[in-house]
Image: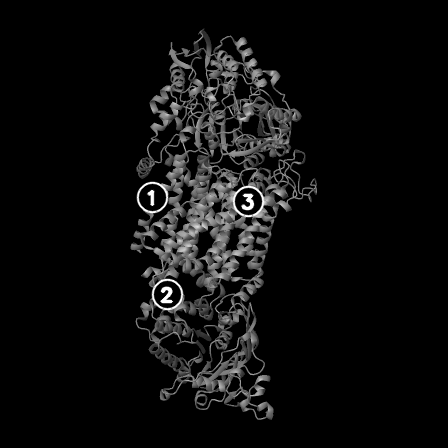
């Protein structure tokens, strides 16, 4: 047996190595970020799916916004709702809206947009209860097609916020003929929309490549021929990729790296307030200490919101009392950019409530989900301990955290940050609706329930706005739960590119210009 | 004269002073063994007397002094020798307290894994037959799934904390012990005195305890010392995955993983616990190697 | 057997660094081997006989060192040789066979491979020529079906066959001196006889001298021309084989001979040497055999005997033969 | 050899069965996936009919039975995150991991063998202490710390390598180095002790007595005997290697199976978790089998009987 082991071992291992090298060379030719017409953006988590009705994931929608169009769109600066695919609309009565589409809008595969596409898309999400976006569109009863370009949206109950509802995550319009012909699975792996960019390739957890759709109905509005969304979960790696020019934009830059990104002469830090409010929800269920308003108020007064935003968020982020953010319909301006902090008063309140020698509670918090969530939780526990509230802090991995709350096993308090993709107070304030969080928060206020129910269907917009403002004041007086601050969006951007992030956390490629 | 080409030499074989003299000699002579013992003793002492040694409470947040560099770097203050982390907590105190959890998790999980492993090893080695084949297939299947995979899946289901960490690492690491102990049992079982005890009707249980266990313990000690090291390293990786110990509890692994975002700016937050882990593991492995040579002289690897 | 010396060892000292201190295993050994002569080094294990042999080829263990003395081979002092020069000697001019045939051959290489490499190490020779010579040598050492053995692995051969292969390997380059370290100890008696017969033929055919290391006086009687008896790293008696058996001078040699059974004295009780070999770390002051010797005198306990008896053919390191002893030095001392 | 092969293959079946049981019970215990699949405020009745459709109300054994039947057809269920067949997603990501693990293994072998042999021949000298110390430091350094530091030094400061992602050959260098360090350290220690064992054998002394050159004695005679345990050691590193990819792939954004598994566990996408664990376990079993076979094939002493 003239087998020479050394050769056998060498050859076998060499082949594994050669296979790898060749494979990776022949693999995707990594278009370097320096190539002028390609924009490379680094995200923290991968896009989940192309099923626009089934992801509830802001960073996924940030990509879809460039591939699909809604009927209406929200003007980023003014907050007004404008026409997108729709040409015009007319309110026939409280529950029916007649909409006319713009003419000759092409899908990426050449198909022309018509009412059938809208009917299929909106009825899919409003009827299929297993879709994650279903609850936001259940109010739509059916779509009555008049002709190719006009149709009537019938809602089950009057929905003053319908326009906002049709200009958000889950409102993209899908090509019905393409889907019926090739099946939804084929659509999922080869998506087609009307947006300025069309699908090229998706290597999961690595990169999503889009290219410019030349026949975009909005005309030639973007400077980039190709866009690559890369997925880099590790913060320091994402920042390093930005600093070495490997990517043009990197999302979610942690505060520890803001200075380094801003000081580097090839990159700068682009920050804006988001409409995501960081809050501590507490139990109102009978028998829990937090059911007592004095305790809640003490918990709120003990927290120095400004100290949190200054020390942990480097000054970015705005302390607030109301969770409704600026630019949202029904925003109560006097409750924003302000906070209550009075540790002395907090101690008195605790004494009044009978906890002069200390109150023991448990605080649940996710870890690594929101900006500095773990650090903020620990700082709050520190602040509470100054006034005699001993909070046992318990961190949960995200899925457990969701399960814990859904099963109603959460104890005194839990930290949560919620955005508002509808930019309408309805979406933010329905969290104070009793049934919605029965067993989890059990907050019930007769007056508030009626106010919110009425506002939800009040077609008179001025009156509706006042109702929501009144609701926010009522919530503030009741100190239903401490609200901390509005989070900031922190993106690292290369100097070769000019971009300001928008409050809705969407990434509009066409707003990104070359310097 | 060319060194170390062939160590088969008559003199080495027939010079055998008595047992204790041998330990003393070997320890004193073998540099690595001594170094290992010193390091391990120091880290255990640090862990035991952490409350006395640590200058500050590890969880005390101090917004005023955030991200201070170590004392000897400019900008550092002597109050915080190793500087502070992003919440202004004293790094030195956190590393001192961290040793408690890291060593505790290492040792406790090894003891648990050892208990399970030795029992299964003894039973499977002693009784053999279909019991042995079933248990060995069980061992093969546990071996096929990398420990970190097990820990990842289990810890994400159950809330991770020090106790769950110990149980999970204990329940997944027993496999190496089982294989080792089974091998030893198989060889010892053939020995005459075991057969003799069997023939005069001594119960299996007693045989296992009296004859097999003592022989197996020695090599078990060697393997367990080394796997305390591997467990300490694994705990750091689990913290990276967000499944290690949760604040306010602190361990070397959790400090290291929390500090990783700061490696570019305040590198010391993550690097010092890394050094602590490396030195302790170095000590444990040297001690383990030395124990192996003292306990079973057959292996000539020293 | 010409009278000019092939190998001459003068005052050789070799010691080992161990955890318990430096062990002087060879403590001033001198002897010669003439061309075609068989010299036997006899002694109990730990007497330093193997170490002496290993020192000649300088293949000691890592912690072993030749401290002093000279090893003259054809007049050249090997202790002064560097590694390259020694390599030319090993296997070429001096080669060695060992006690354990089972472990002395590399289990993962075929016999042929381990033979041809010896040739390639010392001569420019083609593969086929080397194979041919190897098979030829296997025939010479009496191995049947040499071709098949050439292509087989060591573990498939019997103990005797393996020892023959070892001898074949040792003779590949026609060495002048063959060192045989307990060549037959691990073999059973019948095979032992065949190997000894083979070694004798080797001397005749290849005119090789043999340094035979053994503890078996029977093998000495069968093979050796001259004998050196070693005890605790020193040669205590050296003479030709007939004188040694007929008229042993040193008490230790007598003890050795008395403790081996003879054909004609089967009924007599075998006498053994009392006590045991002292540990090399704590050699006694005087004669190292003093505490086991039946004739210990007081001088034996104080001074180290030198070559007391040293006529040209017989040497013995014992005060019994010296004539300048004072009376009180001669006083008998009871030790065991 | 054939008889041994058959016996070993037969042994694998119960092992795979046990693994499937372990994986299934982990998933079963993981709790109710439905809660995560439906939006937060899905009504109780929605939850109920989804559970029914997924057959989650059946007793444990029945569910395991169904699971096993599907397993045999390679159906691990559909990933609710990706909406496609779980096995397909896992196999789609496997090449990236194999490529990284393969190169890491190659690097560690190329480093560990010479270093192991060298430190074995320099035993008890200060050099040996340095080599052993370095090996232990390599083993003790957590992967992610090393990975991030390599990026900071070689990509950010020196700019020699791209920071992350998969593409050209340059992309694989730093991740492979990170992954290989721990493995190389472990293998160096194992090779060192195996070489010390071989060097102390009688046949090495015989080889020296033949006057062979020093390298021939060490690299041919001694190493060939160590080669057999070395090969087994190399294949047995698979389990540690795969464990290492979990961390390395996350740090370097390498689209492999390791990263997929972590994301799936966090998102409780149990179909993918099951498929990945099963594929990884089978890979480890395969490599252990190869190690066994190679061990027997290469050692002539065993091959004969």
Work out whether residue A224 or residue A44 is closer to the camera in this orientation and state it: A44
Task: Give the quarter of the image for residue A244.
Answer: top right
Residue farthest top in this picture: A92
Of badges 1 and 2, the one in the foreground is: 2
Q: Residue D139: x percent and y percent?
A: 52, 50
Work out whether residue A488 or residue A217 is closer to the camera in this orientation and state it: A488
**Residue topped by disc 1:** D17
Q: Is mark 2 on a helix, strand or loop?
A: helix
Q: What residue lies at 54% left-to-right and 46% top-to-bottom? A: B102
* Pointer 1 with pointer 2, Cβ within 8 A: no
Image quarter in which the C terminus of chain A is found: top right
Work out whether residue D219 or residue C102 is closer to the camera in this orientation and state it: C102
Of badges 1 and 3, the one in the foreground is: 3
Few, some or many residues within 10 Å of mark 3 (<14, 14–19, 20+): many
Q: Residue D131: x percent and y percent?
A: 55, 56
**Residue topped by disc 3:** B101
Q: Is residue D202 left or right of residue C326?
A: left
> Up-down: is D71 above or below A291?
below
Marks 3 and 2, the one that precedes in the sequence = 3
**Residue topped by disc 2:** B192
> Up-down: is D144 above or below C110?
above
> Up-down: is C15 above or below A404?
below
Chain for numbered disc 1:
D
Q: Which mark is residue B180?
A: none
Q: Residue C288: x percent and y percent?
A: 54, 81
Task: Give the quarter of the image for residue A309.
Answer: top right
> Up-down: is C53 above or below A359?
below
């Amino acid at each position: 047996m003239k087998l020479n082991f050394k050769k056998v071992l060498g050859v076998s291992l060499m082949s594994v190595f050669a296979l790898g090298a060749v494979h990776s060379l022949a693999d995707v030719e990594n278009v370097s970020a320096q190539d002028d017409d390609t924009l490379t953006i680094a995200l923290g988590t991968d896009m989940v799916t192309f099923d626009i009705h089934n992801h509830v994931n802001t960073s996924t929608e940030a990509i879809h916004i460039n591939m699909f169009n809604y009927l209406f769109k929200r003007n980023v600066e003014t907050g007004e709702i404008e026409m997108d695919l729709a040409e015009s609309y007319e309110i026939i009565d409280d529950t029916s809206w007649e909409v006319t589409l713009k003419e000759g809008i092409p899908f990426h595969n050449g198909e022309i947009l018509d009412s059938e596409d809208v009917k299929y898309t909106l009825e899919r999400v409003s009827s299929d209860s297993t879709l994650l976006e279903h609850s936001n569109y259940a109010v739509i009863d059916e779509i009555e097609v008049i002709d190719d370009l006009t149709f009537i949206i019938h809602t089950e109950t009057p929905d003053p916020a319908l326009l906002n509802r049709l200009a958000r995550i889950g409102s993209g319009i899908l090509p019905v003929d393409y889907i019926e012909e090739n099946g939804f699975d084929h659509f999922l792996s080869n998506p087609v929309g009307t947006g300025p960019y069309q699908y090229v390739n998706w290597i999961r957890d690595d990169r999503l490549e889009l290219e410019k759709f030349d026949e975009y109905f909005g005309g030639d509005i973007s400077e980039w021929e190709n866009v690559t969304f890369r997925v880099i979960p590790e913060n320091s790696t994402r920042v390093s990729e930005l600093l070495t020019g490997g990517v043009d934009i990197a999302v979610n830059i942690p505060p520890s790296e803001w200075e380094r990104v801003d000081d580097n002469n090839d990159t700068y830090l682009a920050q804006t307030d988001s409409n995501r409010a960081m809050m501590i929800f507490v139990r109102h269920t009978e028998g829990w200490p937090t059911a007592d308003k004095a305790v809640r108020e003490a918990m709120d007064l003990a927290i120095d919101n400004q100290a949190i935003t200054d020390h942990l968020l480097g000054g970015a982020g705005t302390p607030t009392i109301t969770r409704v953010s600026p630019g949202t319909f029904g925003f109560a301006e006097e409750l924003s950019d302000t906070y209550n902090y009075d540790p002395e008063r907090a101690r008195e309140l605790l004494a009044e409530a009978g906890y002069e020698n200390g109150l023991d509670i448990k605080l649940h918090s996710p870890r690594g989900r929101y900006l500095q969530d773990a650090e903020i939780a620990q700082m709050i526990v520190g602040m509470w301990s100054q006034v005699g509230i001993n909070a046992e802090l318990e961190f949960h991995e995200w899925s457990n955290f969701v399960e814990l709350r859904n099963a109603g096993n959460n104890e005194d308090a839990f930290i949560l940050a919620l955005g508002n993709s509808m930019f309408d107070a309805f979406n933010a304030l329905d969290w104070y609706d009793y049934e919605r969080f029965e067993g989890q928060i059990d907050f019930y206020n007769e007056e508030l329930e009626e106010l919110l129910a009425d506002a939800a269907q009040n077609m008179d917009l001025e009156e509706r706005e006042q109702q929501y403002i009144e609701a926010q004041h009522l919530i503030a007086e009741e100190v239903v739960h401490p609200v901390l601050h509005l989070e900031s969006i922190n993106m690292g951007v290369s100097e070769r590119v000019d971009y300001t992030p928008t409050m809705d956390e969407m990434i509009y490629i066409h707003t990104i210009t070359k310097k | 004269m060319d060194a170390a080409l062939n160590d088969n030499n008559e003199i080495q074989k027939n010079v055998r002073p008595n047992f204790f003299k041998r330990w003393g000699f070997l320890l004193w002579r073998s540099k690595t063994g001594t170094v290992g013992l010193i390091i391990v003793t120091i880290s255990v002492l640090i862990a035991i007397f952490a409350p006395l040694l640590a200058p500050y409470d590890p969880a005390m947040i101090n917004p005023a002094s955030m991200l201070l560099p170590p004392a000897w770097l400019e900008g550092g203050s002597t109050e915080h020798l190793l500087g502070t982390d992003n919440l202004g907590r004293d790094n030195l105190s956190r590393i001192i307290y961290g040793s408690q959890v890291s060593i505790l998790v290492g040792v406790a999980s090894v003891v648990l894994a050892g208990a399970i492993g030795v029992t299964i090893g003894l039973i499977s080695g002693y009784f053999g037959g279909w019991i042995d084949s079933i248990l060995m297939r069980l061992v093969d299947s546990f071996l096929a799934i990398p420990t970190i995979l097990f820990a990842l899946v289990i810890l994400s289901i159950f809330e991770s904390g020090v106790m769950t960490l110990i149980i999970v690492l204990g329940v997944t690491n027993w496999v190496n012990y089982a294989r080792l102990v089974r091998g030893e049992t198989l060889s010892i079982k053939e020995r005459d005195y075991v057969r003799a005890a069997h023939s005069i009707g001594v119960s299996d249980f007693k045989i296992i305890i009296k004859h097999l266990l003592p022989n197996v313990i020695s090599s078990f000690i060697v393997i367990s010392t080394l796997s305390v090291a591997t467990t300490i390293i694994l705990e750091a990786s689990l913290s990276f995955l967000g499944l290690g110990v949760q604040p306010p509890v602190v361990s070397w692994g959790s400090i290291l993983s929390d500090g990783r975002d700061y490696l570019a700016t305040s590198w010391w937050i993550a690097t010092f616990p890394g050094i602590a882990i490396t030195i302790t593991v170095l000590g444990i492995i040297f001690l383990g190697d030395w124990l192996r040579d003292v306990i079973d002289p057959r292996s000539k690897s020293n | 057997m010409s009278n000019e010396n092939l190998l001459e060892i003068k005052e050789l000292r070799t010691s080992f660094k161990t955890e318990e201190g430096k062990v002087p295993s060879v403590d001033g050994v001198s002897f010669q081997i003439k061309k075609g002569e068989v010299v036997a080094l006899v002694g109990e294990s730990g007497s330093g006989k193997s170490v002496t042999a290993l020192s000649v080829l300088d293949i000691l263990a890592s912690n072993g060192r030749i401290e002093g003395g000279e090893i003259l081979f054809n007049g050249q002092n090997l202790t002064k040789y560097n590694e390259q020069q020694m390599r030319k000697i090993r296997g070429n001019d001096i080669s060695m066979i060992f006690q354990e045939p089972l472990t002395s051959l590399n289990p993962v290489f075929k016999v042929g491979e381990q033979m041809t490499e010896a040739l390639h190490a010392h001569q420019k020779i083609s593969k086929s020529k080397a194979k041919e010579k190897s098979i030829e040598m296997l025939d010479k050492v009496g191995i049947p079906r040499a071709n098949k053995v050439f292509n087989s692995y060591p573990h498939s051969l019997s103990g005797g066959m393996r020892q023959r292969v070892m001898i074949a390997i040792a003779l590949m380059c026609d060495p002048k001196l063959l060192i045989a370290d307990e060549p037959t100890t691990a073999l059973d008696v019948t095979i032992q006889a065949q190997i000894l017969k083979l070694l004798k033929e080797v001397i005749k055919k290849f005119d090789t001298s043999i340094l035979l290391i053994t503890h078996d006086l029977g093998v000495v009687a069968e093979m050796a021309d001259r004998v050196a008896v070693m005890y605790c790293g020193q040669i205590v008696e050296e003479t030709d084989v007939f004188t040694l058996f007929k008229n042993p001078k040193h008490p230790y040699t007598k003890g050795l001979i008395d403790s081996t059974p003879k054909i004609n004295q089967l009924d007599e009780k075998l006498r053994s040497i009392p006590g045991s070999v002292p540990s090399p770390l704590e050699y006694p002051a005087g004669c190292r055999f003093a505490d086991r010797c039946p004739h210990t005198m007081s001088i034996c306990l104080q001074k180290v005997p030198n070559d007391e008896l040293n006529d040209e053919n017989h040497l013995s390191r014992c005060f019994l033969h010296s004539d300048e002893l004072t009376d009180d030095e001669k006083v008998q001392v009871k030790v065991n | 050899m054939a008889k041994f092969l058959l016996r070993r293959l037969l042994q694998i079946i119960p092992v795979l069965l046990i693994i499937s049981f372990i994986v299934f019970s982990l998933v079963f215990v993981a709790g109710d996936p439905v809660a995560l699949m439906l939006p937060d405020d899905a009504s109780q009745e929605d939850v109920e009919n989804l559970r029914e459709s997924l057959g989650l109300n059946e007793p444990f054994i029945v569910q395991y039975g169904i699971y096993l039947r599907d397993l045999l057809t390679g159906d691990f269920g559909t990933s609710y995150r990706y909406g496609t067949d779980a096995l397909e997603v896992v196999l789609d990501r496997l090449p990236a991991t194999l490529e990284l693990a393969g190169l890491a293994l190659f690097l560690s072998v190329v480093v560990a063998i010479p270093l192991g042999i060298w430190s074995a021949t320099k035993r008890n000298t200060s050099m040996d202490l340095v080599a052993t110390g370095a090996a232990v430091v390599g083993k003790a350094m957590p992967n992610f710390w090393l990975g991030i530091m390599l990026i900071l030094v070689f990509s950010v400061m020196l700019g020699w390598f791209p920071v992350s992602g998969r593409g050209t050959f340059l992309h694989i260098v730093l991740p492979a180095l990170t992954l290989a360090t721990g493995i190389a350290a472990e293998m160096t220690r194992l090779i060192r002790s195996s070489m010390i064992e071989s060097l102390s054998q009688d046949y090495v002394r015989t080889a020296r007595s033949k006057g062979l050159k020093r390298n021939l004695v060490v690299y041919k005679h001694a190493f060939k005997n160590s080669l057999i345990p070395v090969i087994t050691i190399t294949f047995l590193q698979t389990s540690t290697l795969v464990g290492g990819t979990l961390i390395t792939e996350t740090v370097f954004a390498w689209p492999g199976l390791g990263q997929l598994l972590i994301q799936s566990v966090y998102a409780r996408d149990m179909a993918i978790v099951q498929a990945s664990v099963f594929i990884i376990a089978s890979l480890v079993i395969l490599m252990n089998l190869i190690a066994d076979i190679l061990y027997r094939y290469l050692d002539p002493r065993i091959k004969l009987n």
